[in-house]
Image (spheres, helix red, strand yellow):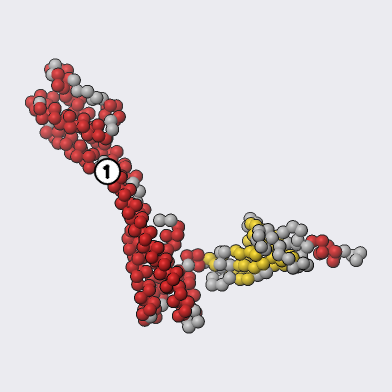
Amino acid sequence: MNNKQKAQLNQGKELNKLNSDYPVLAEDANYMAIVTPMLTLYSEVSDLAPQQEESSKQETEQKQISKVSLEENCLRITDLMVSYGYLKEFAPFKTIANCSKSCLAGFSAIDLIIHSQYLRNLIDEHQQESTDAGVSPELKQNLVDSTADFQSKQNDPKDFISQHKAITNQIDVKLERFQELLDFSLNRYMRSKYEKANPELYNAYRVAVDLDLSKGKVHALKGVFTDSVTGEPVKSVLISIDGGKAVMHAKQSGKYFIPSLNSGEHEFTFSRKPYQTVVRNILTYPDKCIEMNIEFTPIEIEEAVLDPDD
């Protein structure tokens, strides 16, 4: 799942918790009519998510293990047959081709299966010689079983990829519907019903459905930068938060917006040449955006005020 989908899954989890924390919501028929299908979607996606997270790597590894097992069984039987063939001058066994370990390892899947069937046919056609060579019923059965196992695994990784794609499509459709109900039904209903009538519940709801808020993040600060003398917008201002790296804001219009911050007190440093640096300590909240306009004083104006000769 991508980050957005994980955020949506977290919203479903938090809505479940909200229902537990505020039993009054169970008495709101309109709320339940909206949130019930949302939570059903959440439950369905929660069941699908672990399947989506699985990798085809395991399937590929199992296929390789099966191939090695078949190679070993082929080699064991081939060694016995070739040894007997040279000892007894028995041509059908003496002339077995592609019988080395390196040849078997270099076979494609289909060639390895064909070779194993070729060995089985030799055993059936020359049963007495095979027995004399030391090819027991157990060895033959091991060859049969490992061939069948390897054949069964040929499409496993491809099948897995197809199944994985189908699961991903299901998750996409379900979460798209979840988001639609959240944006256009639940958010609007909760704002209309509880923003004024029950602010505590409404704020708890906002925290529940906003992943950033649920982690202590807020849409924090916005405002306009202006020149204190001319009143004109000041553009391309560097903002440092809590002594961190300064980042340029308001490149075009002089308006700035800081989208998210941890709740609590922060130190903002605003700088732009040729103006005095402005430092502000601001307390941010989990449920409101602070509007703070900043006026920059040109350095030459400040120097003129401080000049003792004036």
At horizontal 18% and vertical 39% (from top left) the residue drawn is 145
At horizontal 28% and vertical 42% (from top left) the residue drawn is 62
Going by the numbered disc 1, the residue's amino acid type is: Asn
Q: Nearer the viewer, residue 164 or 76?
A: 164
Count of labels shown?
Answer: 1
At horizontal 90% and vertical 66% (from top left) the residue drawn is 310
Q: Which residue is mark 1?
A: 155
Residue 8 percent location from the top left of the image: 42, 63
| Residue furthest right as drawn | 309
Write down the quadrant of residue 37 in the picture.
Answer: bottom left
Determine if residue 265 is in view: no
Position of 112 with respect to 270 (left or right) is left
User: Callout 1: helix, strand or loop?
Assistant: loop
Is residue 203 placed above or below 109 in the rendered structure? below
Position of 308 with respect to 259 (left or right) is right
Residue 196 percent location from the top left of the image: 50, 82
Position of 147 with respect to 124 (left or right) is right
Q: Nearer the viewer, residue 90 or 135?
A: 90
Residue 84 percent location from the top left of the image: 15, 21
At horizontal 75% and vertical 61% (from top left) the residue drawn is 275
Is residue 200 placed above or below 257 in the rendered structure? below
Q: What is the crowding at mark 1: few (fewer than 14 residues within 10 Å), some, or many (at least 20)? A: few
Write down the quadrant of residue 262 in the picture.
Answer: bottom right
Residue 29 percent location from the top left of the image: 36, 80
Is residue 238 placed above or below 229 in the rendered structure? above
Determine if residue 43 is in view: yes
Which quarter of the rendered picture does the N terminus lie within?
A: bottom left
Is residue 106 placed above or below 301 in the rendered structure? above
Position of 68 with respect to 23 (left or right) is left
Write down the quadrant of residue 249 in the picture.
Answer: bottom right
| Residue furthest bottom as drawn | 197
